[in-house]
Image (cartoon, rainbow, N blue to C red):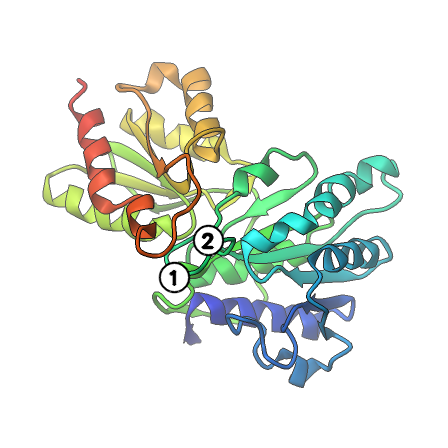
Amino acid sequence: MAKVTMVEAVTMALAHELEHDKDVVVLGEDVGINGGVFRATNGLAQKFGEDRVIDTPLAEAMIAGMTVGMATQGMKPVAEAQFMGFIFPMFEHIVCHAARMRNRTRGRLTCPLVIRAPYGGGIHAPEHHSESIESMFAHTPGIKVVIPSSPSRAYGLLLAAIRSPDPVLFFEPKRIYHLNKEEVEDDGEEYPLDMCFVIREGTDVTLVTWGAMMKETLAAADKLAEQGISAEVIDVASISPLDMETIHESVAKTGRCVIIQEAAKHCSVSSEIAANLADQGIYDLLAPVKRVTGYDTIMPLFKMEMKYMPSVDRILQKVNQVMEVS
């Protein structure tokens, strides 16, 4: 069993499905010969050929349109948007066609596609390279939205995404592509696409997060433990569909919840989780639900981007606020 980074786990999952399913193809800008801008497709074109790992022109709308067409005709395309900010030209094909295909044809056609996109800030990138816009797609019926936070979950969730009969947007937090290594067995075992993962059990407060924010959240949980506060940490992983049952079970145990996200605060995934807890879990709450988020402004350029993103100190501040409520 190899120890791999998240980006290497993505490559493993793609290679596994290319090898075991002849209908799987990978396409996108520079995914072939160059192995992708973050090397997530490194070596795949050499191993599986340029008819399975396809370099496309720099034309995101065309890539999305081709992907929808392939998917409706029995293929399983995995397209890459080089950065999440480049997904905007793909938006119409994703929302107007991929998401609606099963409903539009009353089940005659399905759209088993995956669109991968490195997402989030923290790597000193220019404009349109650091967006966190998962809530835009989570709001759209017919699309699954998945964000891994570790190598093992990247591998298992990407396998499940490729095997899904419906479209999946798979957003990879590029800030943690090379953060750490995990032992990941290339056994083809997928993870469920509709479940949260309890990463760390606790009794005093529930910390809910996803993607790269897992790094700061776990660091905050360690500091809280030094203060005698036991934090349960939940990795949402599947933004849509959203597994509120696991979150409710945790909050029923701890009575307190802090949600951490990199995205802007307004109309976000954290908003939905907080609203659901207020509606369905109000009698379990000992304190108001708090959120630690990005700001309602454009992600700043690299000198300021880490001030935009939630920090360990900001998480601790919100946790201490909810712990003060008896």
- x then y, percent, for residue 102: 81, 40
Q: Secondary structure at mark 2?
A: loop
- x then y, percent, for residue 2: 43, 76
Query: Where on the picture, by quarter, is residue 303?
Result: bottom left
Compared with 220, 317 (above or below) is above
- x then y, percent, for residue 182: 38, 67
The CA span between labels 2 and 1 is: 8 Å
List the residue tagged with mark 1.
123
Name the residue located 31 percent from the left edge and 50 percent from the top edge: 304
List the residue tagged with mark 2.
130
Query: Where on the picture, by quarter, is residue 60?
Result: bottom right
Name the residue located 60 percent from the left edge and 58 percent from the top edge: 116
Q: Say which amino acid is labelled 1.
A: Ile
Visible in this render: residue 323? yes
**Picture quarter with the C terminus:** top left
Compared with 64, 39 (above or below) is below
In the displayed orientation, state which residue is furthest to the top: 283
User: Depth check: 240 or 22 in front?
Assistant: 240
**Picture quarter with the N terminus:** bottom left
Question: How many neighbours does mark 1 have within 10 angstroms: few (below 14), some (14-19), or many (20 or more)?
Answer: some
In the displayed orientation, state which residue is furthest to the left: 227
Name the residue located 50 percent from the left edge and 59 percent from the top edge: 154
Q: Earlier in the sequence, mark 2 or mark 1?
A: 1
Q: Is residue 130 left or right of residue 54?
A: left
User: Depth check: 302 or 309 in front?
Assistant: 302
- x then y, percent, for residue 36: 57, 72
Q: Are marks 2 and 1 in contact (CB under 8 Å)?
A: yes
Label of residue 197 in the image? none
Q: Is residue 183 left or right of residue 253?
A: right
